[in-house]
Amino acid sequence: MALYTQYFNRKYNTDGALFRGRYTAVLVDAENYLLHVSRYIHRNPIETNTPLACDLAEYEWSSYHSFIKKAEMPKWLVRDFIFLLQGKRSKYAAYKQFVGLGNTKEISDFYNTKPLSSVLGSQDFIESIKDYITTSNSKSKFVTKKHSPGDVIVYLATYFSVEIDDILMVKKGRKEKNLPRWFAMKLCQDLTGLNLQALADVFNVHHFSAISKTVGRLNILMLEDKKVELQVKKLRECLVSAIKI
């Protein structure tokens, strides 16, 4: 940010800070809250103290237009997981209607509370990560061990008694759910720190959206089948090493 501020000031003959405050990361319980966070972000232009637009459709600097199919989608934008969380066929119209309903009080209260909390999620979600939170100088920091994709994949292949290639490779014509592969994608996303494109290379798919689509399907399955949800949690707990602060 500092280098960009220097560049901006030189180009436009200005000085001083460019951004109002430091970047703050929030860990989000994706299954239960990501869709609401997406709505909160897209409604920001009309809900700031000084609105940037009267209507969301009038605000140029937003991905909202791509989410409702009113603009061409940039190559870097991944919408599939958000649409999967909706669970509706008319995804563009459904998302527009969802955003139009406005933010919930819970989400508004969360983002209006200062200082901003480091975690947004259900109580179960917060409990599942509390062992990796340490307090220093009154601010929460997350300390986790990064795993390699190999760690995750070998563990799951052993656990399910399948070949590693059954997890790594796409099986042509396969209609049934390949849960070991689905679990591997989700746990690699959670535990390795790799971005979607890097994971696409690991799992031999051409585009990173295949990862987000598969993880989205698994997230929906977890909501529908508590046994699957418990199995994912068990596998994550077995893979995550205890960290003593």
Image (tube, grey):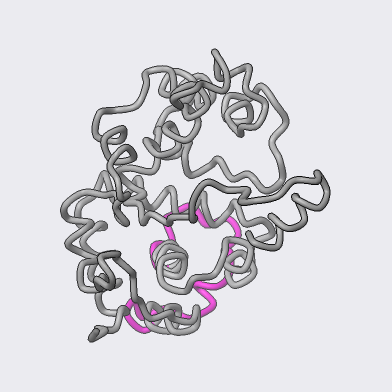
Say whether residue 142 is left or right of residue 154: left
Picture residue at 33% right of the left edge, 42% below the top? 33
Against 81, residue 198 (above or below) is below
Residue extending furthest toward the top: 54
Picture residue at 38% right of the left edge, 54% below the top? 26
Against 79, residue 21 (above or below) is below
Residue extending furthest toward the right: 11
In this rendering, the count of numbered labels is 0
Q: Quadrant of residue 179?
A: bottom left
Q: Does the magenta-highlighted stretch encompass residue 21?
A: no
Instruction: Pinpoint residue 5: horizontal percent, then vertical percent.
Output: 69, 55
Instruction: Pinpoint residue 215: horizontal percent, then vertical percent.
Output: 45, 54
Instruction: Classify the position of the N terminus by image quarter.
Output: bottom right
Picture residue at 38% right of the left edge, 82% below the top? 155
Q: Quadrant of residue 56?
A: top right
Against 127, residue 84 (above or below) is above
Along the line of sight, the residue nearer the viewer: 191 or 7? 7
Instruction: Pinpoint residue 218: horizontal percent, then vertical percent.
Output: 38, 53
Say whether residue 109 is left or right of residue 94: left
Picture residue at 38% right of the left edge, 77% below the top? 156
Along the line of sight, the residue nearer the viewer: 151 or 71? 71
Along the line of sight, the residue nearer the viewer: 208 or 28? 28
Along the line of sight, the residue nearer the viewer: 206 or 27? 27
Instruction: Classify the position of the C terminus by image quarter.
Output: bottom left
Say whether residue 11 is left or right of residue 77: right
Q: Which residues are magenta?
A: 158-180
